[in-house]
Amino acid sequence: MQTNCASAVIFLLLVSLVIAKIPRTDVTVSGFSSGGAMATQLHFALSNDISGCGVLAGPPYYCAGNGMTMVICLNGPASFISVSAMQTALNSNALYRSIDSLSNIRNDPVYAFSGKYDTVVLHGIATLNEQLYTRFGANVKTNFNMLAHHGFPTDNFGGNCNELNKPNFINNCLRNGEQPTLNLFNLTITTRSSLSGFDKQGFVYFPSACISGQKCSIHVALHGCQMGKSYIGDVFVTKAGYVEVAELNNIIVIFPQILASTAFPINAMGCWDFWGYSSIYYATRSGPQISGIKKMIDTVRMINTAFVGVH
């Protein structure tokens, strides 16, 4: 894998997910904060399709249950959260075939990050991702030692690494980098349910090679709370570091977007659903957001296949 002054964390994440081994599938996923929680939900629910996961400062799978333990899931104490209970929830979902087979997770690459100064998703809670994934035999790599607050870590944009940067929750933790020309398109999303929370438009980044006839892998990148385009425009998409690495390594990146809502379903900060506001089945294949992202993956794969076919 190549890099050229790209985000160090994104480079390590995509190295872990794409290069660690020959992937089972052509799709990987990552996310920050609530997007990190959704990334684990996607990976476990759709492991027939997704073969790697990056969790940046996000709580582990089903940590909040159906909302009853949401505050503890974010603020702790971590000793109140049972990894065994999350493992049991996964086993139960697999038994009833509401998620794909957990045997798929074995040897899948997983990258877990949490800043030591994080008080939004407590550091000790985010690190539980390593324990949970290890129980299912994943190949887990971690970065739990960075002196960072709750922010998406980049090497060229954002606030101070050890401070909470509320304007966009992106922190400049290393200093290097430049932005390439972006092949960025809007993706119109049609969903069956208004409860899904999706913005009507998201973003897709197509590297030059992928629109010139090369078959490319796909990565789904999920923003955190208050980081969708209705809050910060395309800042997360263009500044987080995904596109630099994607362009150099021929990876298509899908950036789905979530809207805030103060009416039912209540999602006041535009978070991905990790506590059940969209459905009690939010962490399964039938969850509105998981099934919606699956449709996006299928659509983008068809577009890439069409590009391949005309060259």
Image: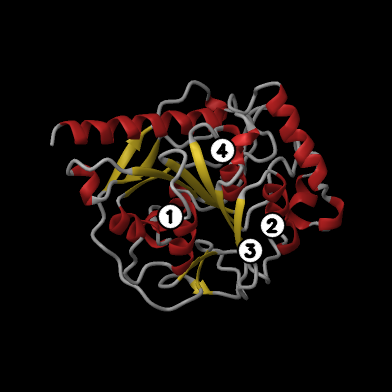
User: Which residue corresponds to mark 1?
Assistant: 19
Q: Amino acid at mark 1?
A: Ile
User: Which residue corresponds to mark 4?
Assistant: 42
Q: Quadrant of the C terminus?
A: top left
Query: Cα distance, mark 1 to mark 2?
Result: 24 Å
User: Which residue corresponds to mark 2?
Assistant: 126
Q: Quadrant of the N terminus?
A: bottom left
Query: Cα distance, mark 3 to mark 2?
Result: 6 Å
CB-based contact (under 8 Å), mark 3 and mark 2: yes
CB-based contact (under 8 Å), mark 3 and mark 1: no
Where residue 114 is drawn, which disc sits there? 3
Q: Residues within 10 Å of mark 2 (few under 14, many from 20)?
A: many
* Vertical arrangement, residue 239 with respect to residue 106, above or below: below
Among the two numbered marks 3 and 2 on one chain, the one whose residue lies closer to the N terminus: 3
CB-based contact (under 8 Å), mark 3 and mark 4: no
* Vertical arrangement, residue 142 with respect to residue 92, above or below: below
Does residue 261 appear in this view?
no
Q: Position of residue 193 (x, y in %)?
A: 53, 23
Q: Residues within 10 Å of mark 3 (few under 14, many from 20)?
A: many
Query: Cα distance, mark 3 to mark 1?
Result: 22 Å
Where residue 253 is drawn, which disc sits there? none
